[in-house]
Every structure is written in structure tokens, then in C-alpha cells.
Image: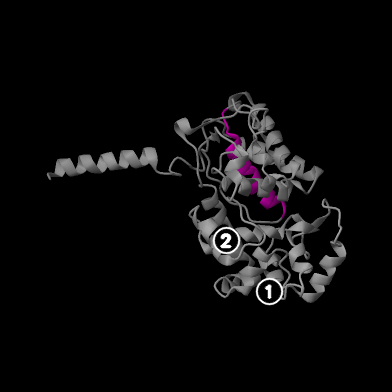
Amino acid sequence: MGRFHLILVWSLCVSLCLLLCPTSAQLKTNYYANICPNVESIVKDAVTKKFQQTFVTVPGTLRLFFHDCFVEGCDASVIVASTANNKAEKDNPDNLSLAGDGFDTVIKAKAAVDAVPQCKNKVSCADILALATRDVIGLSGGPSYSVELGRLDGLSSTSTSVNGKLPKSTFNLNQLNSLFASHGLSQADMVALSGAHTLGFSHCNQFSNRIYSNPVDPTLNKAYATQLQQMCPKNVDPDIAINMDPTTPRTFDNVYFQNLVEGKGLFTSDQVLYTDSRSQPTVRTWAKNKAAFNQAFITAMTKLGRVGVKTGKNGNIRRDCSVFN
């Protein structure tokens, strides 16, 4: 085969891959530089206002981003409302516990962006969610980082697409690694993203199996188990919320990992990161080194933000984040 033919075949392969392969090549931090140059400050101002109204803005937005990206990619499909003809992602049982304040944060930020004539209907809900997530992490004491932009909003949102896509609180390390690997995320990425449990809260049914088994889960700190039993009696109101991090629940920090070392991981899927010898060294390192955790978290969030990105004909810019155009 001649050199020309080789070049032709190679260029055809590249073209095909650009069409068919999942890619984040279109994402770049300055994507809106000539479209809506102040988008980052507009979003940050809106998110800060919402944060001043309620702290739930922080875990609500962070969890919304994760649940969005793990189902059909980072395309704001989780924000779409159900209609008479379609039960959307947000109404799947696994998403019913997503805080309304997370959705409201994106909707308010979108309104603020669209209030600027140059920016109206030019910035995707998916990108606004990615920016808002970075901003709530910073507002709660976490690291700031550059957000890659250029995602389009997804054209589909179905409740059935959520099934089996989100980690369960009972998962072991193999199950966690397998699910995260399906999105190109390593064990270190998974442990870092689990560190987001330094914020937010859970309902008692997510860990009652640990505190009411006989015997009580032996990996659980005894004093912590007693405390949880007091906060979550057997017939507890299902709406009662328990902090994921009992020590510094409103601060993005590495205390989550220090808690794991002490047996104070709330979920089975939290504590297993310490009890499994394969991930324990990472937990120990980040328990002692906040800077190392922050850097790993930024890396993992950037990789997460590239999952299943929609471009070209596979997406559009939704005029209303909760409704398809």
C-alpha cells in the first residue's frame, strides 16, 4: 500500500472516530470567550445569592452534577421535568432524594445568564451546572479549578435510563470500581469523588442496615453507631436528615477521610474505602494531606465533566433547563 493510501486510510479512521467515538475534544475552558465572555462571573453571582439563602445549595448542586453525569453523560438531562407522555430521570426512585435547591440553583443561574442579551440562549444548562458545581465547592471552602466548557444539553431523559447507573450505599469496592471504570474513572478518582460526602446529608434508610443488624456492623465506630441509633430510631420519620460528615458537615475538607480512619463512614460504600486494603492507603494519605486530596478531587471532577458530552446533532441549548425545546 502506497504512502498516499496509508494517509487516506488514516484520515478516514480519524474522521470516523470523531463522528463515532465519545470525545471531550470540543471542551475548552475559554469556550464562551466570544459568545458570553462574563458567563463565569454571572453564574457565580447567581450561585452565591442562592448559597446565602440556604446551605443546601452546596450538596444539592454537587449531587445533581454527579447524578447527571453518571446517567447519559453530563447533559443536564436530570433537570428535565416529566410530562404526561414521559417519566424523566428526576422521577426515578434513585433521584427522588435530589434536593430541590440544586435544581433551583441551575434555573436561577440560567435566568441570570439569559438576562444578558449577548448570552441569551447561548449557554447550555449542562455547562451552567458544571460551573455552579465548581462554585459551590469553592463557597464551602473547597478548591477552585478551571471548568472545561462546550457541552450541549441532552435530547432525552427517561426514568428507565437511570436504573443500575448510580452507586448504591451498600456497594463494595469491586462494585464501586466497576461502575466508575465504565465512565473512564479510576479507583483514585472514585475515592476522591466519594470525598464529596464531606458535605450534605442522608436519610436513615440508607444505612439502617448497618446500625440494626445483629451484631451491629463491626466496621462502624461503636460510639458513632450508638449516636446514629439515637438519631435514627427504628420508626423514624423518613424525612429526617443525618449529616454525612459528623465533624465538619458544612465545610469541604479532608475530614471525611479522617472519619473513615476512625470508623465513622456513614454508608457501607464509604467505610469500605478504608476497610479494603486496596483503597486504604489512599484514604490514609488524604486523611493527612488536604492539598493532595484537593488536587485529586480537581482531577476527578474534570474527568467526570467529560463523561458522555453531547456535541453537534446529539444536543442543543435548552431555552428552559426543565423542558426540551
What element does badge 1 sit on?
A: helix
Q: Which residue is mark 2?
A: 176
Q: Look at the numbered discs 1 and 2 and tell me whether their residues touch, using CB distance below 8 Å.
A: no
Name the residue located 55 percent from the left edge and 35 percent from the top edge: 154
| Secondary structure at numbered mark 2 | helix
Q: Which mark is residue 307?
A: none
Q: Residue at x 51, y 40 (%)?
A: 30
Residue 60 x/y as whole percent: 72, 47
Q: Taking 114 as reference, is 135 above or below it?
A: below
Q: Which residue is label 1 attached to?
A: 261
Q: Position of residue 139 (x, y in %)?
A: 71, 50
Q: Position of residue 318 (x, y in %)?
A: 59, 29
Residue 250 visible (yes or no): no
Above or below, 263 against 196 in this view is below
In the image, the segment drawn in magenta is 122-140
- Quarter of the view holding residue 278: bottom right
Counting every numbered tag in the picture gives: 2
Between 91 and 146, the one lying in front of the other is 91
| Whether residue 315 can be seen here | yes
Query: Is residue 173 found left or right of 83 in the rendered image?
Result: left
Q: The N terminus lies in which quarter of the figure?
A: top left
Q: Is residue 131 in the magenta section?
A: yes
The residue depicted at 80 percent of the width and 70 percent of the height is 225
Q: Residue at x 70, y 63 (%)?
A: 267
Query: Does the stretch in magenta take in 251?
Result: no
Left or right? Give the position of 22 relative to 259. Answer: left
Looking at the image, the residue that sits furthest to the top is: 117
Q: Earlier in the sequence, mark 1 or mark 2?
A: 2
Of circles 1 and 2, which is in front?
Answer: 2
